[in-house]
Amino acid sequence: MTTPLHLVLHVPKCAGKTLERHFEAHMRPGEFVKPKRRSVPARWVLPRHARDAVPDTGRVRVISSQQIGRSLEARFAGRPILRSTLIRDPLGHALSYYNFRMMRYVAMGWGTYDFDTHVRSEPRNRITRFLLATYLEVPWPRLVAMSGEEAFALVTRHFREFWFVGSHLLCDELTGELGPVLGIPPVAVRQNDRAEMAKTIVWDELKAADLDPKLRAAMVDANAVDEALFDTFAEARHGAGAVKLKPPTRAARLAPLSHEIARPVHEARRRLGRGYW
């Protein structure tokens, strides 16, 4: 087949749900698929995706998921693959993820915890690390040994081949581009679980302005690779192959070992804070 396959990589908290629900609502059965990876422990020894991850490769026109690995593309040999993704600045991503979690916990009757605990329990450079571990299928030992410069170079090398890359704020532009091509509406209904929960849940949303300026600066510095990736590609759109790279300003590690060693302690604090292990 020569019909292009659109691969829309869903980075968490970057408008991916809006896109996926739009595809689900307007595409015919079999044309849109959300591939999943194998469950534990099978995925430790077998290929990332089971054979039935995409039931009918000839019929599918769009795949989108948080679980897409690059190895899945081999099943579409002979078809052009047009890759798209949306990303976010590290501070905005951390705040969005934190507020979403807290509101979900309140809705479930659980407890909450402070932003510092959230940050200390999360991986550094979460978006870059997600792209490497999920899409590029880089194993954990290599991730923690990787320098910030190496991680940035690896992701940007692949991003240069993407059809569309940009900030999560360009979600409407991406749906506007995909709509006419796929024969679906060019405007998607915004899917924001946090906004929906805010209608019924009382939670004082934490915003960047609420944080101490030193903490905001420390967040950017600690996630220098994510910041550099966003600065480089936030406005790229179809021009990812021609953007001027803005690499990390210092020789940061992608996943500092000291932070990785301490993370389980803060993950335990997080679980105790929410009152459910």
Image (tube, rainbow, N blue to C red):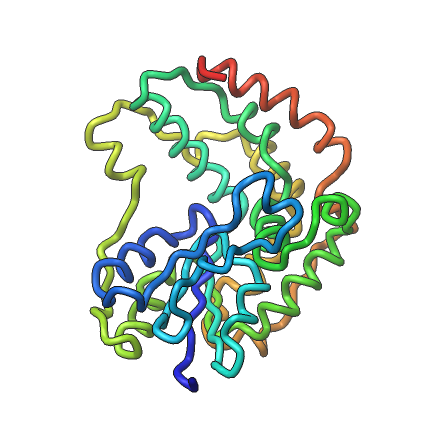
Describe residue 99's horizontal placement relative to residue 49 as left or right: left
Describe residue 41's horizontal placement relative to residue 152 as left or right: left
Q: Residue furthest bottom?
A: 2
Percent x, y of residue 116? 56, 25
The one of 112 and 216 positioned closer to us in this rendering: 112
| In the image, residue 95 above or below residue 125 | above
The one of 204 and 24 positioned closer to us in this rendering: 24
Residue at left offset 42%, top offset 62%? 54
Percent x, y of residue 52? 44, 58
Residue at left offset 27%, top offset 58%? 24
Residue at left offset 45%, top offset 17%? 274
Percent x, y of residue 204? 33, 25
Q: How many marks?
A: 0
The one of 9 and 188 positioned closer to us in this rendering: 9
Describe residue 31's horizontal placement relative to residue 10 as left or right: left
The one of 107 and 219 positioned closer to us in this rendering: 107
Describe residue 199's horizontal placement relative to residue 120 as left or right: left
| In the image, residue 245 above or below residue 230 | below
Residue at left offset 50%, top offset 70%? 236
Percent x, y of residue 147? 77, 51
Name the quarter where the N terminus is drawn. bottom left
| In the image, residue 214 above or below residue 31 | above
